[in-house]
Amino acid sequence: MRRRGRTRIAFRFYLLLFAAMCLLGYGVYIAVDSMVQRTTVIESGNMGNQYTVDAVIVRDEKLTDAEGITSITYFADEGGYVFEGNKIAAVYSSGYSQTDMNKLLSVRAQIKEKHKLLANSVYGDTQLEQLEKAVMEFAREFELVVHGDASGNLQNLERQLQSAMDKRQNYLKTKYATDQNLTSLYENEASLVKKIANWTNNRVASQDCIGSFYTDGYENYLKAADLESTTPTQVLSVLAGQQPPMTSAQRGRVAVYREVKPNGWYLLLISHDATWKPVDGQTLKVQLAGFEDHIVDGTVMSSTRTGNDLLIRLKVNGDVRPVLNIRTSQALVGEEYVSGYKVPLNALRDQGGQVGVVLTDRGGIFVPVEVVTQNNEFAIILPMAVGALGEGQKIRVF
């Protein structure tokens, strides 16, 4: 009997010990599972993504065109800075005659030779010597700048040189008014200048700008002032190389030059990434193809999604000259890091069409959030209600 009693006590002891170990193990499992897999802690974080896009460049530019053009002479340098009022080009209409131009050049060459003869025949003319000295000084300075041996504004020097030459000519014209040959040359010059003026139209800059004489036909189709109304279809047509439609007013007119504002330009980006949700005012970093060492910052003005095509309108503050003659390009775009609360994607829960997270330290309350951006693992979120979330709070993962 005693032997059977001891056996029953041993069995119960081991049974209770086993139950206690199972209970302890389950508790440890629940605790570890809760800490490692089922909950996480809200952290402050940053995030950004990179996208490959097709880009169309838009400049803030004004196109000057004309009709009935037979010839154009440019006075400004391609891509050079032009001040308001400076002459950019001379446009010759259908009345242009190269014969008349050659005659004018010939008459002026004869006047120049006549001036030399008269100047050499007169000694002690102090005023003429001063006028001649001024001409020579400006001519020398102009030559040095042209050959890169000195710095200076060529257009200003040209005006100063022309002014000095005009003063010398006027002096000689007055001093030797009785010289019939010189008088005849002056009359021929005046007649030819008047005739040529009828078919010559000098164009001057309407603003301080970068001057350019290369055009691609999109200047009136893609305007900085019309960016908000530009559609993905329009941008795709430019990327495909389709020529823009021409209005009746544009037919028969020839592009002469562009006046381009030097600082600030725009990008129209086309992306087919269905997950990209750019935010107005967000800063993006853009690297155009072929500009590996040149990355620009652009600000998102607005975006439009049509089917699979996402159009992003971007403003770039910077020198326009690197893209002065570029219309399309591929580009690598990186989102500037956005700040917020960083959580794993499996912490996001959809409840009645509203995305949010579930707090564990406040009785499992659902907190609606805005997903600012995300990648394959994490999301940057902000609570819809200010102060509803904070760093260090525990949330459920699913």
Image (spheres, rainbow, N blue to C red):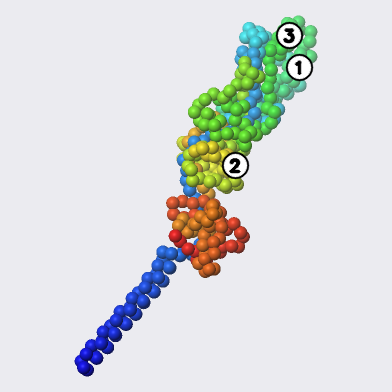
What percent of the width, then of the height, locates residue 249? 66, 19
Q: Position of residue 258 (x, y in %)?
A: 62, 27
Foreground label between 1 and 3: 3
Secondary structure of the residue carrying numbered label 2? strand
Could you say which is closer to the camera, residue 176 or residue 259?
A: 259
Q: Which residue is mark 1?
A: 170
Q: Nearer the viewer, residue 1 or 272?
A: 1
| Residue located 54% across and 61% down the image | 366
C-alpha span from label 1 to label 3: 17 Å
Quadrant of the snapshot with the N terminus: bottom left
Which residue type does callout 3 highlight?
Ser
Task: List the single residue furthest toward the front.
Answer: 1
* Nearer to us: label 2 or label 3: 2
Question: Is disc 1 in contact with disc 3, using a CB cutoff of under 8 Å?
Answer: no
Say whether disc 1 or disc 3 marks the residue closer to the N-terminus: 1
Neighbor class of circle 3 (other Cα within 10 Å; few <14, some 14-19, many 20+) is few
**Mark 2 surroundings: few (<14), some (14-19) or many (≥20) residues within 10 A:** some
Q: Is residue 377 left or right of residue 355?
A: left
Q: Which residue is mark 2?
A: 302
**Residue depicted at x 58% and y 23%:** 245
Instruction: State which tag comes first along the sequence, 2 or 3.
Output: 3
- Between disc 2 and disc 1, whose residue precedes? 1
Where disc 3 sits, the SS reads helix
Residue 314 seen in the current view: no
The answer to which of 110 and 252 lies nearer the viewer is 252
Compared with residue 193, is residue 136 higher up or lower down, i.e. above or below?
A: below
247 displayed left or right of 167: left
Does residue 30 appear in the picture of this structure? yes
- Front tag of 2 and 1: 2
**Residue at left 73%, top 19%?**
166
Q: Are marks 2 and 3 in contact (CB under 8 Å)?
A: no
**Residue position marked by numbered label 3 in the rendering:** 191
